[in-house]
Amino acid sequence: MRHVWRRCAALLVGSLFMALPLRGHAQDGKKTYDLKPVTAERLLKGTDDPSAWLMYGGNYESWRFSPLKDVNRENVSKLRVAWMFQTGIPTQFETSPIIADGIMYITTSYNHVFALDAATGDPLWKYDHPLPDDLRVCCGPTNRGVAIADDKVFMGTLDARVVALDRRTGKVVWNVEMDKYTDGFSSTVAPLVIKDKLIIGMSGGEYGVRGYIDAYDVKTGVRKWRTYTVPGAGEKGVETWAGDSWKYGGGPTWVTGSYDAEQDVLFWAAGNAAPDWNGDMREGDNLYTDSVLALNPDTGEIKWHFQFTPHDVWDYDGNTDLFLVNVVRNGQNVKALAQPNRNGFMYVLDRATGKFLHGSPYVEQLNWAKGLDEKGRPIVDPKFVPQSEAKEWICPGAPGGKNSSYTAAYSPTTKLMYIPVIESCMQMKKAEAMFVQGIPYWGGGWDKTQGDDQSSYGHLSAIDPTTGAVKWRHKEDYPLLGGTLTTAGGLVFTGNQEGHVMAFDDTTGKVLWKFQSGAALRGQPATYKIGGQQYIAVPSGGGGIMAPLAGEPPISSKGSALIVFALPEKK
């Protein structure tokens, strides 16, 4: 039934406009777009080019920071809606807009891609990916955005394919299969382009698949390498899996990684082990699940790894933002990797070696571990390990902490990370698990969540990655599930489940501006400048599986729209 609705919605939106081929300099008959190739050099600049937002995290360091300051603390209260685009597609609008040469590219659930004029919102073309009716998707039909390179945009799909589209016309250039979707594979991640390769992860850990990270040739779609996140027979690390449990070990890779161009190292996280809540048949640490991998982007070779949650039986996953930042140690700058993990701890590692530097809780409710040892390994409290009968409230619950579905941000101006947080505990339990290809392999679940009685809440927390100190917190009645953006204008943008888009003072946490969007926020904001005007783009609505787990919002969140804000034009 949901696929019938998806098709009807797509037809409805498609009837509103026809694809407008952008020939030559990308003309639609009224306006000319000077589309220059998105080269490796352009990608390396990241948001240093204020007219563009070229990748999921804004830059390779995943800061989600813009040097733009036309909109700032003094004038943000004057922000107004510049334009709005209704997608017509329900559920999980988690996209991160990509902007290049005056055109914006967004995705929706069920693998629709829209190209819009970034200054006016006028639709230019739309691509609807054909999907089968028997998808294997554990956690909703979301898509988090495209990648862009040369003259193409790229998307991973729910039926485990990678599609390259001509960014002028939306026509398919190449379309390749990652894996068999009937076995439980899919892809919801925004890909990342490094040099001549498209790097992409997969979903499906809840189906007992064996996770991996792939690299494809940008021009041809030929797969160049695949690195498994669960070692195979005879490989280093397979000894951390009892028997042949590695064959069904999980380790999905559904959040975009980061890239250190100076060291030429790709960082990508791997998610939970399978089955999720029952670890009896997979005794051991279960490498490389719940880990970050440092990879050679040319070959996929693993240089080092760090595991956040060994032998995960809480579904804590390891897929959250990986920030490449500098921290201070003994008066010296150290090139570090920082991650607010779903398990409630923020980790800081030396990104050259993977050495644990420090870690600390960023949530207010944490009881599953008593702390981290000197190597960063959690000191698990056995009282809060899921049993066959759910008795204890385990904190944080399986969604986090900070969930992987939305983004935190970092400002090089304040040197602070801004983390939207869920505070919601769960009563988890384990159950018998039998692996059947293409069938969910949970091994348990939860009985209750604090979201059931509305005792969950959220906060936006500003944290110093050098020390782990919380500089300020803004609390909300409901968990925060929207992405985050920082700017040189001294602002932090995010949104809440009550439908407000919000701008904060990045040093004090004071709310400087609010706008009621009419739907709960799930997507990732971005900013850019065209024709002398700074715009802030915010995906709004679309619902999602997180609300029932962490507290139902008080307003409808089924429809999805992109809302773009700007200051009033000067007369």
Image (spheres, rainbow, N blue to C red):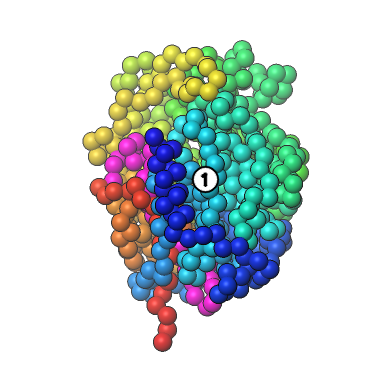
Give percent across and percent down for residue 316: 46, 32
Q: Quadrant of the C terminus?
A: bottom left
Whether residue 183 appears in magenta in the rendering, the answer is: no
Q: Nearer the viewer, residue 43 or 74?
A: 43
Whether residue 529 appears in magenta in the rendering, the answer is: yes
Q: Secondary structure at mark 1?
A: loop
Seen from this angle, which residue lies furthest bottom?
571
Query: Number of marks in the image?
Result: 1
Q: Residue at x 53, y 31 (%)?
A: 204
Q: Amino acid at mark 1?
A: Asn
Residue behind mark 1: 111
Q: Residue at x 48, y 33 (%)?
A: 133
Instruction: Tell me if residue 109 can be seen.
Output: yes
Q: Nearer the viewer, residue 235 or 213?
A: 213
Q: Quadrant of the N terminus?
A: top left
- Quarter of the view holding residue 19: bottom right
91 vs 81: above or below: above
Give percent across and percent down for residue 350: 63, 44
**Within 10 Å of the Cα at label 1, are there few (<14), some (14-19), or many (20+) other Cα atoms?**
many
Q: Residue at x 30, y 21 (%)?
A: 391
Q: Residue at x 66, y 30 (%)?
A: 228
409 vs 373: above or below: below
Instruction: Tell me if residue 401 can be seen.
Output: no
Give percent across and percent down for residue 515: 32, 63
Give percent across and percent down for residue 202: 58, 36
274 vs 513: above or below: above
| Start-end of magenta stretch | 527-553
